[in-house]
Amino acid sequence: MLFQVVQSLRGQTQPSDCSPSPSSPLLVVDRFGGTEAATFCALRTLLRQLEFESHVDVYEFVRVSHLQRPGIWRSQVRE
């Protein structure tokens, strides 16, 4: 579902007087502590990287994200 939200955001059109440039910041708010917002930002960034560079580097994105905000994603061990 989150992937569909990111895709729909890419296709949104806005009035020309308030249309942000591609480099404009996007405010993302998460009521659950940031994990969903971080996932949204990751998907959006990786989709842009794929569009412009024809490849994605998930490892590098997650590494930088962890440096900026340690513990944003936690692995879950299932028994």
Image: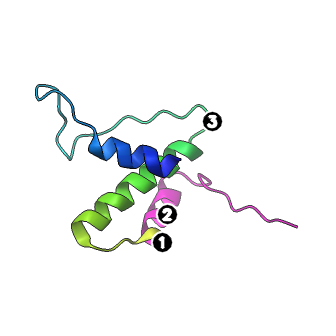
Q: Kindly identify the residue that appears in the image at 58 percent across and 46 percent down.
A: 35
Query: What residue is disc 2 on?
Result: 62
Q: Position of residue 19 (x, y in %)?
A: 17, 32
Query: What residue is disc 3 on?
Result: 32
Q: Does the magenta portion include 64?
A: yes
Q: Amino acid at mark 1?
A: Tyr
Counting other residues with Cα less than 10 Å from the Cα at mark 1, is it few (<14), some (14-19), or many (20 or more)? few
Direction from residue 8 to residue 35 in the image, left or right: right
Mark 2 and mark 3 lie on one chain; the one further toward the N terminus is 3
Q: Kindly identify the residue that appears in the image at 32 percent across and 74 percent down.
A: 55
Direction from residue 14 to residue 7 in the image, left or right: right
Q: Residue furthest right?
A: 79
Tag 3, which secondary structure?
loop
Q: Position of residue 68 (x, y in %)?
A: 47, 53
Q: Quadrant of residue 43?
A: bottom left
The reply to whether the C-beta atoms of the residues labelled 2 and 1 are less than 8 Å apart is yes
Tag 1, which secondary structure?
helix
Mark 3 and mark 1 lie on one chain; the one further toward the N terminus is 3
Query: What residue is disc 1 on?
Result: 59
Structural distance between the alpha carbons of marks 3 and 1: 24 Å
Q: Does the magenta portion include 12?
A: no
Counting other residues with Cα less than 10 Å from the Cα at mark 2, is it few (<14), some (14-19), or many (20 or more)? some
Q: Nearer the viewer, residue 3 or 65?
A: 3
Residues rendered magenta in the picture:
59-79
Counting other residues with Cα less than 10 Å from the Cα at mark 3, is it few (<14), some (14-19), or many (20 or more)? few
Q: Amino acid at mark 3?
A: Phe
Q: Position of residue 53 (x, y in %)?
A: 24, 71
Q: Position of residue 39 (x, y in %)?
A: 51, 51
Structural distance between the alpha carbons of marks 2 and 1: 5 Å
Q: Kindly identify the residue that appears in the image at 33 percent across and 38 percent down.
A: 26
